[in-house]
Amino acid sequence: MDLNRSPLGADKTEQEGAPDPDYLGFIHSVRQQTGIDLSQYKEAQMKRRLTTLRTKNGHASFASFFQAMMADKKLFYEFLDKMTINVSEFWRNPNRWEVLRDKIIPEILGNKNRLKVWSAACSTGEEPYTIAMILSDLGLLTSSYLLASDIDEGALAKANQGLYLERSLKDVPAEVSQRYFTAEGSAMYRIDEKLKKAVTFKKQNLLLDQFEEDFDLIVCRNVMIYFTEEAKNALYMKFANALRPGGILFVGSTEQIFSPNRYGLEAAETFFYRKM
């Protein structure tokens, strides 16, 4: 389905009882020019964040803000950053990553020595690098394919740089941190070069673009909560279709999938879903 030409839940912009034509026009213009469909995101949250950004940059209307955004690449990247909520840490919710390492990966690996893994909406790289650490510790890093994608080019540039503030490492087990990070200055840490080389980063619009297929593991955490129900349903189906039979979809701690069988999935562990 072409989510750009036929948006799910299109133009759901009624807030407080009446549509806002200025914001409606902004949604339409952004979709036409960039392929990003803001109508697929929960409107109250998205409009509030973008209004803050618009006002901060001195624009009284979304129409004016859009024109400025198209003329100023830096402002456009600010828009993407605000839209995609680039907040992440390594090993976020550590117990879930331990389940992935100790149970899920051994189950989906079977007799193979290679995994095909995708970190979808990877933000600034903390998630795919966490996966890379786990694959490295299991002896699977050099033989596996690890894709990481995001719509925000600025976030991907930071991920490729591999330099992080100390606070991003707060959940990393101490022995893991010692193996994979090098201190730079008083509060910055650089990721191990072998992990950087193992991750393939690319720009991708989850709602619009086609997905690669036959993944053993897809990780998409703390992203779906920002989408409308229609967009979520479409994405869960796309993720399921991108998994091989027996493959696992790993979602965030606020994103439990109810009735996973409607997507051809079944619960494997809490927040892990297996393709049937």
Image: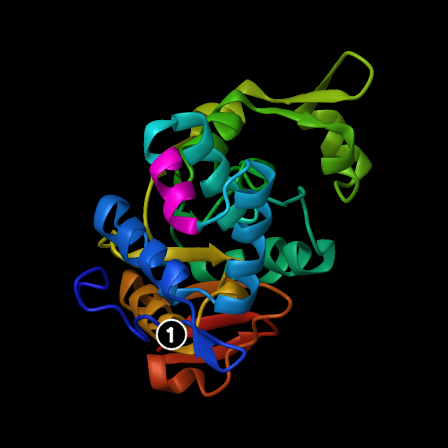
Taking 182 as reference, is 156 left or right? left
Q: Is residue 64 magenta?
A: yes
Q: In the rendering, at what x and y percent does residue 182 appear? A: 71, 18
Q: Quadrant of residue 73?
A: top left
Q: Main secondary structure of the magenta part?
A: helix
Q: Residue at x 51, y 41 (%)?
A: 81
Taking 209 as reference, is 270 left or right? right
Residue at far front of view: 60
Three-letter amino acid code of the residue under disc 1: Lys
Q: In the rendering, at what x and y percent does residue 62 appear? A: 42, 50
Between residue 57 and residue 231, name the one nearer to us.
Answer: 57
Q: In the rendering, at what x and y percent does residue 232 appear? A: 41, 71
Q: Quadrant of residue 71?
A: top left
The answer to whether residue 58 is above or below residue 72 is below
Q: In the rendering, at what x and y percent does residue 56 appear? A: 60, 39
Taking 136 as reference, is 206 left or right? left
Q: Residue under circle 1?
A: 12
Between residue 88 and residue 115, name the one nearer to us.
Answer: 88
Q: Residue at x 52, y 56 (%)?
A: 105
Q: Is residue 152 magenta?
A: no
Residue 12 seen by the camera: yes
Classify the position of the N terminus by image quarter.
bottom left
Q: Residue at x 59, y 63 (%)?
A: 252
Q: Which residues, given as a range, are shown in magenta?
A: 62-69
Taking 86 as reference, is 228 left or right? left
The answer to whether residue 248 is above or below residue 267 is above
The answer to whether residue 71 is above or below residue 8 is above
Q: Quadrant of residue 166?
A: top right
